[in-house]
Image: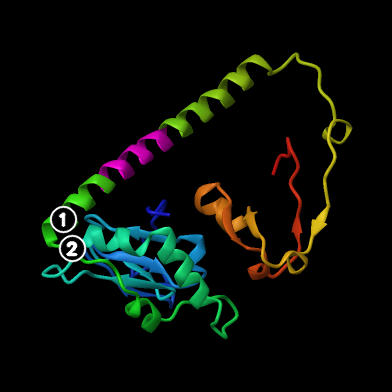
Amino acid sequence: KGSISDLQQLDPAVDKIPSRARRKVFDKSIVYSMVRPNQEHYAFLDNPPTDMLVSTGFSVIDAKTELVSPGYLYYSLTTAEATEHFQSLAEQCVSTYPTLGVGDLSAYEIVLPSLDIQRAIERILGDLDDKIKLNSQLNDYLAELVRAEFSYRFGSGTPTTNLGDVMSISTQLLKPSACAGEIWEHYSIPAFDESRRPVFEPADGIKSNKYVIDNNCIL
């Protein structure tokens, strides 16, 4: 969500280029995943590497800068309202996974104030995004510090036990189809990989049974 954590560098003369790596991106391009929009796989590319390609599973969106600021367009496409709208359209798709069509994406309407106002909004939201990224980096550092301190204080010489003696593995299941109309806090593997946070979505849009999480669970 909002960033690309890792890039794969390939040499066409040596490496096999994945068949789906076909979409060229440019400075200020928006990369938006058309599959399962509610997982929020998107990013705004500020000065990306030359010759960067992305999978055809993404749409590459470039602003018509005489009409809209690239950053303002990015924030307009990634609001909670837009994400919910795109997900509802994707779920109507007949493919294996909920997939948003290019036509549906293009038809979405956004508020379009003057360019000066757009740029002011872009600056404010950009500053907030920068603060969020900084806090995330600080949290990662503190988590690593905690792990290092734990290893230092409770290393060799401390009594040990088998995990099976001090824990149990829960297999309590809940059927989404039995909870139609409810909004679930769904902690899926893709959501964990993306942001380590759950996503909120209608229970009847979830296809398979899910484990129930109690207090003090470890996932």
Q: Secondary structure at mark 2?
A: loop
State the residue position of label 1: 117
Residue shown at the point (31%, 62%) measured from the top left: 76
Looking at the rendered structure, which numbered label has been put on residue 113? 2
36 lies left or right of 207? left
What kind of residue is marked 2?
Answer: Pro
Q: Residues within 10 Å of mark 2 (few under 14, many from 20)?
A: few
Quick one: 219 or 211, which is closer to the camera? 211
Against 113, residue 165 (above or below) is above
Residue 55 x, y percent position in the rendering: 41, 71
Q: For marks 2 and 1, give the CA distance.
A: 6 Å
| Boundaries of the magenta span | 126-137
29 is within the stretch colored magenta:
no
**What is the quadrant of the C terminus in the image?**
top right
Residue shown at the point (31%, 58%) measured from the top left: 75
Residue 215 x, y percent position in the rendering: 74, 37
* Contact (Cβ within 8 Å) of mark 2 with mark 1: yes
**What is the quadrant of the N terminus in the image?**
bottom left
